[in-house]
Image (cartoon, grey):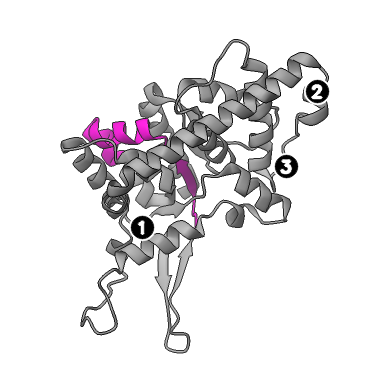
């Protein structure tokens, strides 16, 4: 949840991001399906968010959601607004997050995107200069997520270029690693040994072991457009959420990582009804 606080003795504005209860990560296909699909399912999900859950959300999530236009975009914006302040600004660069973990950051610190918070606040307060006569209302409505779409819409092309660069970087890296692996079958275990799960470094666990998985699969599965950002989604979703949606291939890869682990329960798009039902059940158990 996003909150802004200040006081008489401490007038400096502080923005706090916390997660209470279940942490939920949605890939964009599932988010759009929830926004545009069955109304009763959508209401149940939004009610669950307001009951005891938070949505993990990144700048990349928002940027990819600017693709739909017209009624589709309106539906997504309305859905995000219904989430209210019950969201957490998550970093989507798994390499950056793994580096934070290596430096000793706890999970709540390693996964937060402070740049997202700063940019969001700057955009939401644009036009509120000291002499404007306007008062910034820091109620729950201030932190509605739909506003992010308006902010990022004009930046779609530059974001698409960065996404393409991310795809190329992952494809080149895995291709190079695969060549080394084929040249020397012992290379994989020497350079990328399988990591056991460490609850203080969940992103590092997911990052390294998913790279191993992609290297092994590289002979039969060729990475394609979109896999760079999908890799980032898979690492962050599995490492920091309680419940997450990914596409079928990434769900399989995450579920194939070394066990035991504390990764998220993963669903894919045809399982949205099941996911919402399970979230309802878990929140009732937590409440009891």
Query: Pointer 1 and pointer 3: residues touching (CB < 8 Å)?
Result: no
Nearer to us of marks 1 and 2 is 2
* Mark 1 surroundings within 10 Å by alpha-carbon count, few (fewer than 14), some (14 through 19), many (20 or more): many
Q: Give the mark count.
A: 3
- Give me the C-alpha separation between circle 1 and circle 3: 30 Å
Whether residue 199 is visible: yes
Above or below 132: residue 171: above
Judging by the rendered image, the residue that carries numbered circle 1 is 85
- From this view, report whether residue 257 is shown above or below residue 101: above
* Residue in the image at 52% along x and 25% along y: 251
Left or right? Give the position of 80 relative to 213. left
Sequence-wise, the earlier of marks 1 and 2 is: 1
- Secondary structure under tag 3 reads loop
Magenta span has 40?
A: yes
- Would you say residue 8 sits in the magenta stretch? no
Answer left or right for 132 relative to 187: left
Identified at 75% across, 21% down, the residue is 180
Q: Which residue is mark 2?
A: 187
* Furthest residue toward left: 71
Image quadrant of residue 35? Answer: top left
Q: Earlier in the sequence, mark 1 or mark 3?
A: 1
Residue 79 image position (x, y, % from top left): 27, 44
Magenta region, residue range: 18-44
Helix, strand or loop at mark 1: loop
**What residue did someone put label 3 on?**
198
Q: Position of residue 15 (x, y in %)?
A: 45, 68
What SS does tag 2 mark?
Answer: helix
Q: Nearer the viewer, residue 126 or 195?
A: 126
Any part of residue 261 in sight: no
Mark 2–mark 3 Cα distance, whole angstroms, equals 24 Å
Quarter of the rendering occupied by the N terminus: bottom left
**Marks 1 and 2, how far apart at CA:** 47 Å
């Amino acid at each position: 949840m996003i909150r802004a606080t200040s006081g008489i003795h401490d007038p400096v504005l502080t923005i706090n991001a916390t997660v209470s209860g279940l942490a939920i990560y949605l890939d964009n296909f599932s988010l759009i399906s929830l926004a545009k699909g069955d109304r009763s399912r959508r209401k149940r999900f939004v009610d669950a968010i307001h009951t005891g859950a938070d949505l993990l959300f990144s700048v990349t999530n928002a940027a990819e959601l600017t693709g739909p236009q017209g009624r589709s975009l309106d539906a997504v914006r309305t859905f995000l607004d219904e989430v209210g302040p019950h969201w957490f600004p998550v970093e989507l660069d798994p390499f950056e997050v793994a580096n934070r973990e290596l430096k000793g950051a706890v999970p709540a610190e390693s996964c937060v995107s402070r740049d997202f918070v700063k940019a969001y606040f700057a955009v939401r307060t644009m036009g509120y200069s000291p002499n404007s006569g306007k008062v910034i209302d820091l109620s729950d409505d201030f932190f509605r997520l739909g506003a992010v779409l308006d902010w990022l819409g004009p930046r779609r092309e530059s974001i698409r270029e960065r996404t393409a660069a991310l795809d190329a970087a992952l494809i080149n890296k895995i291709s190079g690693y695969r060549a080394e692996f084929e040249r020397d079958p012992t290379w994989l275990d020497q350079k990328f040994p399988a990591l056991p799960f460490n609850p203080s470094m969940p992103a590092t666990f997911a990052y390294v072991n998913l790279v191993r998985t992609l290297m092994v699969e590289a002979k039969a599965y060729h990475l394609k457009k979109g896999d760079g950002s999908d890799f980032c989604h898979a690492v962050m979703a599995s490492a920091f959420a309680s419940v997450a949606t990914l596409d079928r291939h990434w769900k399989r890869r995450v579920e194939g990582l070394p066990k035991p682990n504390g990764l998220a329960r993963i669903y894919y798009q045809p399982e949205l009804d099941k996911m919402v039902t399970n979230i309802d059940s878990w929140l009732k158990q937590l409440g009891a």
